[in-house]
Amino acid sequence: MSETTNVMNSEVVKRLLCYVSYDTQSKDESSEVPSTQKQFDLAKVLKKELEEIGASDVRLSDHCYVYAKIPSNLDKKVPAIGFIAHIDTSPALSGKDIKPQIIQNYDGGVIKLGESGFSMGPNEFPALAELKGKSLITTDGTTLLGADDKAGVAEIMTMAAFFLAHPEVKHGDICIAFTPDEEVGNGVEYFDVPGFGADFAYTVDGGSVGEIEYENFNAANLRVEVQGYGIHPGSAKGKMKNAIRMAMEFEQMLTVFDNPEYTDGYEGFHHLGGIEGDSDHTTMHYIVRDHDAGKLDQKLAEIDKASEYLNFKYGEGSFKVVRTGSYQNMKEMILPHMHLVEYAKEAMRELGLNAKSVPIRGGTDGARLSFMGLPCPNLCTGGANYHGRFEYACIEQMELCVEILKKIVEKYAVKEI
């Protein structure tokens, strides 16, 4: 795909470029769903597009969930298969006024990100070396791209348009949903599983083409409140308890090699993601993750022990650990339905891809949906470097992801489970 016209005529590219033009950044620590009203701007566009291409039962809920269905054209009963992607983008970096760059026939070298002064290449991001000769969509270095997860949205929409335009291709019920607030942990808070109507589903929210994920972290989110005793430093001797210094002591008590910069694969971690306060009161925000539930409990026990010791040292009530959120590894819910993984791998292999299962070093809406009764592994989208200015998507991989979705649908139309 080296010609500009070919790139720009790609339906999935057109859709992605349209969708990233909408600022749908979600907001941390909001009690509302959606956390930002601007997510409705894209949701309304998607509702209209689904209606225009002929989808059925299209609706937009009060909480910014878009649902649609493509009815079966078979004369037999087969499982209804769902595809889900989220419309919000990460609070980590601005998603406003995104200016995508299209790099055609990538030469394998350094890519300049607009006039931002930032660039990226294979030295920092080795996966780029494998994309030499491909076409990439990058940022201009001032925002994220939004391929997480608007690439997934674009791929599902392109797949839906295909089946609606080609009724001769046989398929069962195809259920579609676009969700808000995945990036802030509330993506399925109000998801209507019965109304969605799928027997099984896939989130389309992964990375490199050829990957399927059905194992994610067990997770706990924690807030550690540190209560000191602020007093004028000129008269502090024997009286002051500096909450900032106490917080630093707490962090230093935790196993250093359990920090994320020392872990990969199935290794878990604890991560101090934020700290704010003063000498009188300081708040620390932790996320704790492990694929093994027992090891997660060990990490949480270590945190509790540090708190207990420091309360003994500084006085009861100096440290308080508050659990603020959690999710579980969906593996146990997928194992009874491994056809979800096998059919996806078959589809990938038929497209000449090296299909592989990889663990998610994070969470996914599919994990919560799986425990809500909708088994839901996660499929690739062709994007990478999410949540930052170095985010990119490979156009050829995105187009392959569309083909994967189509093949999965076709397999459920003919196979027994």
Image (cartoon, rainbow, N blue to C red):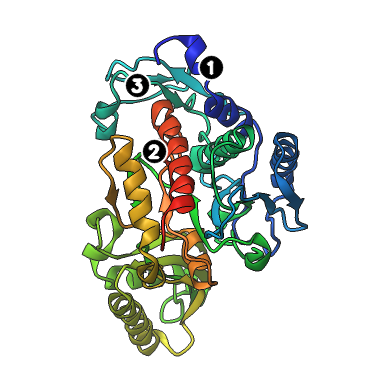
Tell me where residue 267 appears, x and y as whole percent: 25, 63
Counting residues from the N terminus, which is met first, the one under dot 2 or under dot 1?
Answer: 1
On the question of residue 227 being in view, the answer is: no
Residue 265: numbered disc: none
On the question of residue 49 being in view, the answer is: yes
Of 117 and 13, which appears nearest the observer? 13
Tell me where residue 17 appears, x and y as whole percent: 58, 27
Q: Residue at x 23, y 56 (%)?
A: 262
Q: Residue at x 51, y 35 (%)?
A: 144
Evaluate if marks 3 and 1 touch, with contact meaning CB atoms under 8 Å apart.
no
Q: Residues within 10 Å of mark 3 (few under 14, many from 20)?
A: some
Q: Which residue is mark 1?
A: 8
Counting residues from the N terminus, which is met first, the one under dot 3 or under dot 2?
Answer: 3
Tell me where residue 238 appears, x and y as whole percent: 41, 81
Q: Residues within 10 Å of mark 2 (few under 14, many from 20)?
A: many
Q: Which residue is mark 2?
A: 384
Q: CA distance from mark 2 to mark 1?
A: 21 Å
Of 347 and 115, which appears nearest the observer? 347
Where disc 3 sits, the SS reads loop
Does residue 141 appear left or right of residue 299 in this picture?
right
Q: CA distance from mark 3 to mark 2?
A: 14 Å
Q: Residue at x 37, y 50 (%)?
A: 344
Q: Which residue is mark 3?
A: 134
Q: Residues within 10 Å of mark 1 (few under 14, many from 20)?
A: some
Q: Quadrant of the N terminus?
A: top left
Q: Is residue 224 above or below residue 161?
A: below
Instruction: Give the residue type at disc 3.
Output: Lys
Q: CA distance from mark 3 to mark 1?
A: 14 Å
Where disc 1 sits, the SS reads helix
